[in-house]
Amino acid sequence: MYSALLPASVHLTRLHLCWDQGCLLPIHCWEHVFAAGWQLPLLEQLWIGLPDSMWDNEDVSDLEIVDSVAYLEPCLGGSELRHLVQCCLVLEFLSIPGVVRPGLGVSHLTALTALTGLFVGGGVVDDNAASTALAQLTGLRRLQVHAGPGMTDQGLLAMSALRSLTRLGAWDCGISSAVADQDITITIVGFETQGTEVPDVWLQVLARCTRSEDCQVDAINGLVALTTAQELAIAEQCKALTTSLRLQLEAKQKAAQIMLLQQDILASMQAQLDTAQAAVAVVKQQLGASQAQLVAAEARAAGLEQQLAAEQAELAVIQEQVAAAQAQPSS
């Protein structure tokens, strides 16, 4: 039935393959559930084994979840897990605690680059799986490990590489009571970021692992390296700030020099303008004097013309008198 349905389910975004405890499909059936070559290109959430109703449920205790995971019979082999990953490359959430057969590893999960939530557990999770697979899923925001006795303080320390984590839980793993802050058979350790005043989960992990006898030195070195890295980052920021301030100062100095040059140019142009205006005033004065002289000359010319006209009139009178005198007979 599943082999007939899944190839046609290209529009699936959420898939639950969950049954009662111990009632998963037989091992030989899983090679058909996620067969090689099948694709679920839109599948974002996949649950195998325990139903999602058990998680984040106030009526279900952590111990009940641990017991349920431990009761499941591992059914996914290495090839089935590989085909699952190849089939669902856009998965954002995957829940497979207790269903992967021990000794196979979970390195195939590193291909799920969009994964932000992962619930895993059982004998397949140990320190090696934690460091080589889980710690490589740098996009994870929530990680829960259940019933994984092979994951010790070293495996928990590896989780400090997941800088995006906001929730991390480890139930019934091999984590020491000193790190878990508990001294009970079922060791439960949890970290969560709930506000800006709460340190990031990965920082909480580093700090808690300094209590471990096995990885105390590595955790302290991690914190020291972090401090050194922060100091280097601060030094780089100071250097960048100093460079920025120096460039701003140089720019201001150049701007001041340009302003002074502009002021000098403007002063020179103003002086030239003043000189030109003074020269224009002198020319205007000279022009005024010339116009006055011209008016006086024109007045004198008019007077001379009047005198000439009078003299011409007087000459005409004399000529008439002479002509009249000549015309009289001599006695």
Image (cartoon, rainbow, N blue to C red):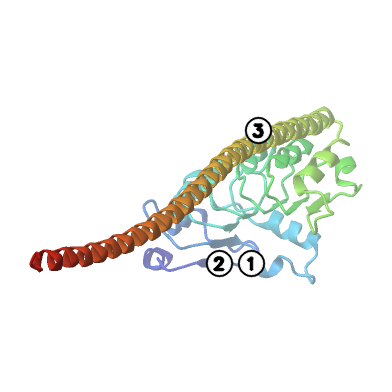
Would you say the residues marked 2 and 1 are in contact, meaning their CB atoms lie under 8 Å apart? yes
Identity of the amino acid at label 3?
Answer: Glu
Q: CA distance from mark 3 to mark 2?
A: 65 Å
Residue 65 picture location, percent across and down:
74, 61
Q: Nearer the viewer, residue 253 or 304?
A: 304
Other residues around mark 1 within 10 Å, as few (<14) / some (14–19) / many (≥20): some
Identity of the amino acid at label 1?
Answer: Pro
SS class, disc 2: strand
Residue at the limit of the structure toward the front, as seen here: 331
Q: Is residue 313 visible?
A: yes
Judging by the rendered image, the residue that carries numbered circle 3 is 250
Quarter of image, res 42: bottom left
Other residues around mark 2 within 10 Å, as few (<14) / some (14–19) / many (≥20): some
Residue 19 picture location, percent across and down:
60, 67
Q: Nearer the viewer, residue 219 or 54?
A: 219
Q: Residue at x 73, y 41 (%)?
A: 160
* Circle nearer the N terminus (3, 2): 2
Label placed on residue 117: none
**Residue mark closest to the camera, 3 vs 2:** 3
Label placed on residue 51: 1
Q: Residue at x 45, y 59 (%)?
A: 33
Asked if residue 171 lies left or right of residue 109, the reply is right
Q: Is residue 176 visible?
A: no
Q: CA distance from mark 2 to mark 1?
A: 7 Å
* Circle nearer the N terminus (3, 1): 1
Q: Nearer the viewer, residue 215 or 257?
A: 257
